[in-house]
Structures are given as C-alpha cells and as structure tokens.
Image (cartoon, grey):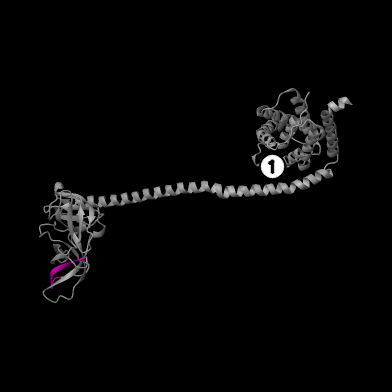
C-alpha cells in the first residue's frame, strides 16, 4: 500500500513537472517522460498484477491530463511494462547505466506504439516526417532524468516484488 | 489454471492492454467525449498545473529580478569604471589641448623677441596672499640670474628675484616691492608701475598735466634695463583724483592673468622686440604682443 502511495505521488509530481516546468526546457517539443521512467521501474521491480495495473494507470493518468484519446498512452505504457518485465527476467538489469539504456529503448518503444496507434486510429493527425527527431530527443531526455527518478524511488523504501524463475 | 497463475503478470498486462485498446477505440470514435474519470483527473490536475506555473513564474521573477540583477550590477560597475576611464582620458585630452594652445601662444610670442629667451614652467606659488610671487623650474644651472624679466604672451609678468640651482623665484608686477618703468602708449606719459596693496598694480608718478584716460595701454619704456621696450603691462582702469599735487597715479589692470600662468619666458636685458611697421593709429609693439596673433 505504501509503495502504491509513494509511486502515485511521484507519478503526480512527475506529470505536473512534465506538463509545466519541463516545457521550459523542451527540445523540439520533446520533454522528459517521468511517467515512462516510473513504468520502467515497475517493469523492473513490481512483477505482479499490481505492477501491470500501475503501468496502465500511469498511461491513463497521462491520457487524462493531456489531450490525447483515453487509452493511447495506457497502451504504450503497458507494452513498455511487458517488454521490460520480459527483458529483466532474462537479462541482468541492475546498474544505473543499464537502467538508463533501458529507459532510452523503452522511450523508443512507447513513442513508436503511440505513433502507430495514432496512425491507425487517427490518421489525419501529426506530421510523420518530424517523428524520428522527436523520438530520439524524447528518448534522450527521458534517459537523462532516469537516474534521478531511480535514485528517488530507491530512497523511498519501496519493496521490490520480483519473480524468480 | 497453473499456467494462468504462473503467467498472471503477462495475462493481466495483456488484459489491460485490451482494455486500453477498447478505451482508445471508444475514445477516438466518440471524440471529443472523455470518460468521467479522465475528466476528474483533468479537473484535479489543471489547478495543480496552474499552481506549479505560478511557482515557476515566481522563481523566474526572483531569478530575473535578483540573480539577473547581479549580472546587471557587474555590468554597471564595469561601465562605470569605463566611464571613469573615459572621463579621465577626456580631462587629459582637454588638458593637453589647453597646454598645446598655451605653448603655441608662448612660441608665437617667443618668435617676436630677439635675443636669448628661456621657456620655463611655473612649479609653485606663494602660499601667502600678500606676496605676489611664484617659482619656476629654471635656475642657475639653466642660465637664469637675478633681475631677468619674466614674460608671458599677454606681456610682462615680473622679474626673477631669487635664483636656486634648478629653480627660481619670480616677483610679480603686482608685488609691493615691484617697480617697472612704463609709458602710456597713446600719450607717451611716463610713470612707474608698482604693486598695490589690493593685489593689483598702480602707475605712479604720472605728471598732472599729461593726457591719461581709462583704457589707455601701458607698456614698458625699456629704461629700467630689465624689460625690453614696448611690452604690454596692462591698461589704465581708473585715475586717482585724491592726489592734488603735481603728480597723480592710476590703477592698472595687468595684461596677463597672473593667477592662471603655467608657462612663462625668462628674457635677458638684451632681448628686444622685433621691429615691425607701426599699425595706423599707434605704435606697433604692443599689438605685436597680443596672444594668438600670427607673426606675418
């Protein structure tokens, strides 16, 4: 319960920062995705139904706070959660560098999922030629804030809930 | 059942993914409709976003109002230092310009004199007001000796009274002990120009019957063996009426601004004014000595 509250608070603060302060330092419209970092954290440490629900809620929160159709970011977050969950069951992802790389790749995945879904469901939206630059910038910015978010979560005393094969 | 238990994370994730896609398809189809929960989240986050924006703007205000001002202050200090430098340079330039003008006048004046003339700088003034004297930077080693005439572009300044090795004291024509044989240029009336108690000078021993009026120019007669003939001393300011004897005196306004002198010429008794054609209406010598006039 405590973990859920802490994660919820961090998610709310992250979302607020994403929608306000981070826009001041945005590069080409891309801002650091704190919620994505949280999703990666869940994929790495919360191997439970609660983890999956948390990923869904993070995406849902992002959809609700932004103008995107409900479920768009939720899909992206769940895909990221599943991939990270499957990855960390087979690869040792425990140091900061590997986590940062994972966030970088996860950002690619999430943005790609969102873009694909948008292209399928709302084809008239968005300029596709600007997506690669946005995708890379977004991934770099998210990876840049990842160490700070991981450090914060590591110091809040959240218990990991990992499966062992 | 065991499969579901072992893969509950994946199963629940996929289930939620399906829910998401369902929500997404509904949301896309029914836009701009939003589900009530999303609206609640939106309603909660909007004011919070406003609060963060308010804090952010406050921080920005502090930053630009204070931290940025530190830079402005530094820049201000640099600019002030630069202004001070430029002002000092301007003062130096103005000083050089004035010095240049004075020296040019002095040189022009020097060219009107024949004989050995030395240029000297005034390096000190008498601290007591009742002794009209100053110190120049030439002395015995430079060929200066007591009794030499001291001149400036405006005319007579005084004479050397004390001579040191590298400096000399000059008694001004306004000193009480000073006396210069002089003539009124227009009427050729003779007299002695002496220092007065009021810091100016007077032309004494003027005969009562001679023609002297205020504005008359007084020049050196050359008879005292110190000052060359024809040098400007000053102009008659007023004539004393109290003296009812054979002689009378007149107040003379010196031709040289003695308080402002910075450079002077030291001339020997053998120095003479170069002869020039007299200008219509009076002798030429005095006009020759007027500062700023080119020698033709």
Please name the residue that numbered disc 1 is placed on.
Answer: A17
Which quadrant of the figure contains the N terminus of chain B? top right
Residue B198 position by quadrant: bottom left
Task: Identify which residue, B284 or B86, lies in the foreground.
Answer: B86
Residue B147 locus on image (x, y percent):
12, 56
Q: Is residue B96 magenta?
A: no
- Work out whether residue B295 can be spotted: no
B24 with respect to B138 (left or right)? right
Which secondary structure dominates the residues rendered in magenta? strand
Residue A64 locus on image (x, y percent):
78, 42
B99 with respect to B22 (left or right)? left
Residue A28 locus on image (x, y percent):
67, 36
Q: Residues within 10 Å of mark 1 (few under 14, many from 20)?
A: some
Task: Identify which residue, B27 or B241, lies in the foreground.
Answer: B27
B178 with respect to B34 (left or right)? left
- Work out whether residue A17 can be spotted: yes
Instruction: Say above or below: B157 vs A2.
Output: below
Q: Secondary structure at mark 1?
A: helix
Task: Identify which residue, A34 or B68, lies in the foreground.
Answer: A34
Instruction: Say above or below: A97 vs B130.
Output: above
Magenta residues span: B200-210
Instruction: Say above or below: A80 vs B157.
Output: above
């Amino acid at each position: 319960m405590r973990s859920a509250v802490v994660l919820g608070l961090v998610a709310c603060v992250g979302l607020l920062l994403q929608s306000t302060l981070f826009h001041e330092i945005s590069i080409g419209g891309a801002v650091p995705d704190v919620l994505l970092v949280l999703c990666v954290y869940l994929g790495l440490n919360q191997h439970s139904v609660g983890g999956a629900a948390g990923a869904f809620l993070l995406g849902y929160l992002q959809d609700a706070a932004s103008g995107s159709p409900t479920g768009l970011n939720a899909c992206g977050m769940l895909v990221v959660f599943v991939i990270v969950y499957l990855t960390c069951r087979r690869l040792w992802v425990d140091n900061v560098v590997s986590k940062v790389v994972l966030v970088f790749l996860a950002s690619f995945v999430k943005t790609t999922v969102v873009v694909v879904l948008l292209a399928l469901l709302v084809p008239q939206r968005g300029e596709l030629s600007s997506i690669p630059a946005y995708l890379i910038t977004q991934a770099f910015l998210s990876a840049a804030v990842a160490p700070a978010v991981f450090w914060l979560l590591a110091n809040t005393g959240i218990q990991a809930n990992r499966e062992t094969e | 059942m065991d499969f579901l238990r072992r893969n509950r994370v994946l199963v629940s994730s996929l289930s939620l993914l399906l829910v998401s896609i369902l929500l997404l398809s509904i949301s896309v189809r029914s836009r701009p409709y939003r589900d009530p929960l999303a609206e609640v989240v939106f309603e909660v986050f909007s004011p919070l976003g406003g609060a963060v924006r308010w804090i952010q703007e406050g921080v920005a205000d502090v930053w630009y109002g204070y931290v940025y001002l530190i830079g402005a202050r530094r820049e201000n200090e640099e600019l002030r230092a630069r202004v001070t430098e430029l002002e000092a340079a301007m003062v130096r330039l103005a000083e050089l310009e004035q010095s240049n003008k004075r020296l040019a006048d002095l040189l022009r004046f020097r060219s009107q004199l024949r004989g050995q003339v030395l240029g000297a700088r005034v390096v000190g003034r008498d601290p007591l007001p009742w002794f009209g004297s100053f110190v120049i930077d030439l002395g015995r080693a430079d060929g200066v000796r007591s009794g030499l005439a001291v001149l400036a572009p405006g005319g007579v300044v005084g004479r050397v009274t004390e001579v040191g090795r590298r400096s000399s004291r000059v008694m001004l024509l306004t000193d009480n002990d000073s006396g210069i044989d002089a003539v009124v240029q227009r009427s050729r009336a003779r007299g002695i120009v002496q220092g007065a108690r009021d810091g100016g000078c007077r032309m004494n021993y003027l005969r009562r019957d001679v023609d002297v009026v205020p504005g008359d120019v007084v020049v050196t007669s050359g008879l005292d063996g110190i000052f060359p003939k024809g040098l400007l001393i000053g102009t008659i300011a007023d004539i004393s009426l109290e003296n009812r004897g054979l002689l009378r005196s007149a107040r003379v306004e010196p031709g040289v601004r003695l308080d402002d002198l910075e450079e002077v010429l030291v001339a020997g008794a053998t120095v003479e004014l170069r002869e020039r054609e007299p200008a219509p209406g009076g002798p030429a010598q005095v006009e020759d000595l007027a500062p700023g006039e080119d020698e033709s």
